[in-house]
Image (cartoon, rainbow, N blue to C red):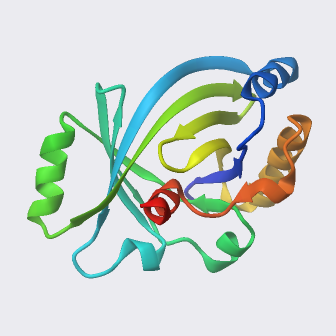
Amino acid sequence: MNKVEIEKKYLIKGKNTAKIIKKLTCLGASHVEDIKQTDVYFNTPKRSSLSSKECLRIRTINNKIFEITYKPPTAENHQSSNFFAKQEINLSVDSAKMAEVVLLSIGCKIITKVEKNRKCFRLDKFEIFLDNVKGAGMFLEVETIDYPKNTFTRLMEIETIVASLGINSADVESKPYRDLVMEEK
């Protein structure tokens, strides 16, 4: 069975990010790096990725690393429970521009662009990100990769981490950055 990405995201608008970083350090998290990501999202020729809740994007990291990502449709129970657990397929490419040419050539259409500055942390099996998303705000995202049968356990661990950071579970955000940015336009 394939592993899935298990992720929850929280709006931290108005929260002191320096305090969150200090609490992360106290929990034993290590700061990995700061990066700039630009994601260009596409619809496929036959369907809307917004209505199907799937993801097809080209990601650029620090203007040096490029990848095409596909995530299948989100299960309805995941969205209503404010988390995502799905397989993610990433393909490294040499050029974001060439990847865009290929996707446009097969009939895909650009729907939006998401730009974010990301502070990356590692805590045991979890990656924790502080994301400043242009046009959407400041977010904390916690994710891990595991087998689907472990999803509930990992979600409980994520909730424990988030509570330790002083973030209220009511601040969970169920929409992907793509949708949040599109709503603001």
Q: Residue at x 48, y 49 (%)?
A: 135
**Image coordinates for residue 92, horizontal then vertical, percent:** 29, 38
Where on the picture, by quarter, is residue 55?
bottom left
Front residue of this view, candidates 136 and 105: 136
Would residue 167 be found to the left or right of residue 93 on screen? right
- Looking at the picture, how far across and down is residue 8, in whole percent? 69, 52
For the image, the number of numbered tags is 0
Residue 175 vertical placement versus 88 (above, below): below
Given residues 114 and 13, the one toward you in this image is 13
List x then y, in percent, for residue 112. Answer: 34, 58
> Is 44 placed left or right of 99 in the picture?
right
Q: Is residue 10 above or below residue 30?
A: below
At horizontal 29% and vertical 25% (from top left) the residue drawn is: 64
Horizontal and vertical percent for residue 60?
33, 36
On the picture, is 65 further left or further right than 29? Answer: left
Q: Is residue 14 left or right of residue 109?
A: right
Question: Which quarter of the rendering shows the N terminus?
Answer: bottom right
Q: Tell me the residue at 73%/43% (across/down).
A: 12
Residue displayed at 21% across by 40% down:
96
Quarter placement of the C terminus: bottom left
